[in-house]
Amino acid sequence: MAAHRKPRQFPLGGQAVRTAATLALASAATATLFEGSGHAEPALTPAQVKAKVDQLYQEAEVATEKYNGAKEKADRARGSLDRLRDEAARRTDRLNEARDGLGSIATAQYRAGGLDPAVQLALTSDPEQYLERAALAEKAGERQAAAVASVHRELTGLRQLHTESAERLTELQGHEADLRRQKAAVQGKLTEARTLLARLTAEERARYEAATASGRTGGGSSASGDAAAVRADRGSLPRGPVSAPNSRAAQAIAFAQAQIGKPYVWGATGPSAYDCSGLTQASWRAAGVSLPRTTYTQINAGQRVSRSELAPGDLVFFYSGITHVGLYIGGGQMIHAPRPGAPVRIAPIDEMPFAGATRVT
């Protein structure tokens, strides 16, 4: 009987319980550490952070110019739709007037003892039926025929306007969807850049901001560094009239000079903030010249010139995608709106990859 008896279970003592628990926790922590290490974000050196931030700001500027282009198209589509709706309202008023005229004729004929078939036709509530049988209007008298023809014209015009309005509305909705996509892209790039910059130590960030303020690199900047850069830019401005090939170029440069120190805001066209193409557009607008909104359309807004032919007032473009523009002021310098955190300033044109130049005519 003793051979088949179940062995007695001895509970662990206090020390043994603590030891077992410690080992279990250590094992779990080790497993978590190894599991998490496979997904940990790699550490970046300060130089890598700076390079990545510069890249993100460049990508944000690409998205900004796409946003500007989508907004320009959306504005045109919205304006076209508004004009079509206004015209439809005017045609509706004219149609009602024409029908009122037919009503007067019908009233007169009824009092005279009869209603002309052509008038009955024009007063029908079914425009399709009217249009199919409009030839009967020829049987009406001269006054009736003119009134019926007026109703016919207005109905035909309204139908065409409604079709065009539906097309413009579809176009507008497509541009607005593109606007939302590009806005999200810009905001995403800028948020990622700020997150990366937050990884730097205070000392590293200070060095980076100082370099940004002097125009040697991109990214965020400090208020004191920006103020110093703006003072230096204004101190380097030529005294007296601007040297330019014509009065309009001189006016554009003078306007751009007055904007030095104002912040970069993507999508902005002034007067308190600008993005790069917004600044050049506003500068030439001050000289009486209308430029398109985006970098990749501004480059085709005049005569192309080589780098060796540059003259003050020319538009200078950068990067292979034509995503940045500045206003050349001579001496290898330009005025431009660099990027978020860096205000409008003077900079050398060789600080970015040169892509081409255009002389506004």
Image (tube, grey):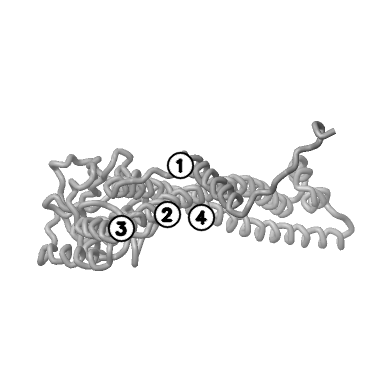
Mark 3, secondary structure of its residue: loop
- Residue ID at (13%, 66%): 235
The residue singled out by tag 4 in the image is 79
- Choose mark 4 or mark 3, whichever is in front: 3
Residue 298 visible in the current orientation? no
Q: Are marks 1 and 4 in contact (CB under 8 Å)?
A: no
Secondary structure category for the residue under label 4: helix
Q: Which residue is mark 2?
A: 191
From the image, tell me which residue sits under label 1: 37
Q: Secondary structure at mark 1?
A: helix
Q: Is residue 141 left or right of residue 312?
A: right
Residue 175 x %, y %: 51, 47
Which of the two discs, 2 and 1, labels the residue nearer the N terminus? 1
Q: CA distance from mark 1 to mark 4?
A: 55 Å
Q: Nearer the viewer, mark 2 or mark 3?
A: 3
Q: Residue 201, labelled with which disc?
A: 3
Question: Total number of numbered labels?
Answer: 4
Q: Quadrant of the N terminus?
A: top right
Residue placed most toward the observer, 36 or 118: 36
Q: To which quarter of the image does residue 48 belong? A: top left
Which tag, 2 or 3, sits closer to the chain's start?
2
**Which of pointers 4 and 3 lies earlier in the amino acid sequence?**
4
Are the two marked residues, 2 and 3, in contact with CB atoms closer than 8 angstroms? no
Q: Residues within 10 Å of mark 1 (few under 14, many from 20)?
A: few
Q: Residues within 10 Å of mark 2 (few under 14, many from 20)?
A: few
